[in-house]
Amino acid sequence: MTGILDSNSILARVPYQGIPTFWRAEHTQDLTAVDFAVYGVPCDIEIVNRPGTRYGPRAIREQSLYVGFTGVHWPFDYDLLQRHKLIDYGDIPFYPGQVDQMLANTEKHVGLMSAAGVGTLGLGGDHLVAYPAIKAHAKHHGKLSLIHFDAHTDTHEAKHLNHGSMFWYGVKEGLIDPDTSIQIGIRTLIPPDDRFTVLTSHQCLDMGSKAIVEKVRQIVGDRKCYISLDVDGMDPAFAPGTGTPMPGGITSAMQREILWGTHGLNIVGGDVVEVSPPYDPSHITAILGASIGMDIIYAMAAAPFRNLSSK
Ligand SMILES: [Mn+2]
């Protein structure tokens, strides 16, 4: 039989059919010849606001099938899945309530990926899941510059790790170099000892994407860097499905333009965190999470240190 509906390759692209891995990538933990891996961390157990991000990875995976329907992610002119090997590594395992196990297992698995030269995209989960991923990459690549999108700085000194203190720990433990890092979209209290360059959301809206991109490139330079993207950096009008929404954020269009502007930076990994499906009845935040996750993978594919352009 012939015809478009008989073609496995076309059927494999029908969004509402099949088992939803991220962007239909193969689900495997075999890292042989892998360029990029997506993994989920369905965790929301040490947060200070509304729970629900444990459902984030699955929601983003499902919506990725709709966003990535054609295989080409606008505005890019090539199918990343044809040019590079992307896998869906699955979720990091941990027993419910055991945050130390989540931290240890995420660090271990991301460490395996980093050592294998794999660029990683983590799907949260709350923002704490970024900390073990950064720790794992810093072990392999050295101290990292951070490109951090958020309404909150997450650099608050605290006795314990949580989704608002992990970057204070990251700096204190020498995983992140704050002097070559930037926080974008902030519109809450900035701790006085925060050494990152901060662009508030209002400064961002005033500057426009081009000037923000220039600033990011000037601060980060050619250093190895990590993109940590809390969807609450965007306005709740664009990303309502999150635990700690804060009115007055950047637009989803601006968010994507800034990510497109990171091509050529040496991005080792990234994450999209704080998507909370219980507050996301139209799935718009998960759709956005899938879309900007793909933007981050395209940006990782353009990192000079990876030298993938000839593949
Ligand atoms: Mn955050």
Image (spheres, helix red, strand yellow):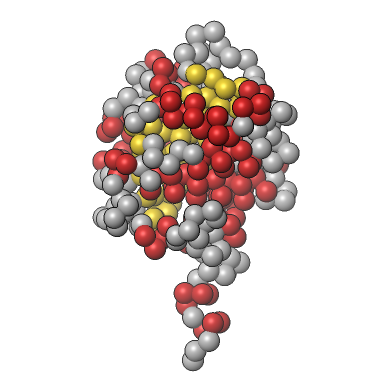
Up/down of 214 relative to 69, above or below: above
Q: Position of residue 112 (x, y in %)?
A: 29, 42
Q: Position of residue 40 (x, y in %)?
A: 47, 45
Question: Which corner quadrant of the image does residue 262 belong to?
Answer: top left
Residue at 46%, 35% (x, y): give it.
Answer: 227
Of residues 59 and 94, the one drawn nearer to the viewer in this rendering: 59
- In this picture, residue 103 sits left or right of residue 202: left
Residue at 43%, 24% (x, y): give it.
Answer: 219
For the image, the number of numbered tags is: 0
Up/down of 63 relative to 97, above or below: below
Residue at 41%, 33% (x, y): give it.
Answer: 226
Which residue occupies the extreme top position in the image? 192
Of residues 154 and 81, the one drawn nearer to the viewer in this rendering: 81
Up/down of 89 relative to 122, above or below: below
On the question of residue 265 being in view, the answer is yes
Question: Which corner quadrant of the image does residue 223 belong to?
Answer: top left
Question: Which corner quadrant of the image does residue 300 belong to?
Answer: top left
Quarter that holds the C terminus: bottom left
On the question of residue 151 being in view, the answer is no
Q: Position of residue 209 (x, y in %)?
A: 58, 34
Q: Position of residue 188 (x, y in %)?
A: 64, 19
Of residues 137 and 187, the one drawn nearer to the viewer in this rendering: 187
- In this picture, residue 203 sits left or right of residue 198: right
Up/down of 10 relative to 88, above or below: below
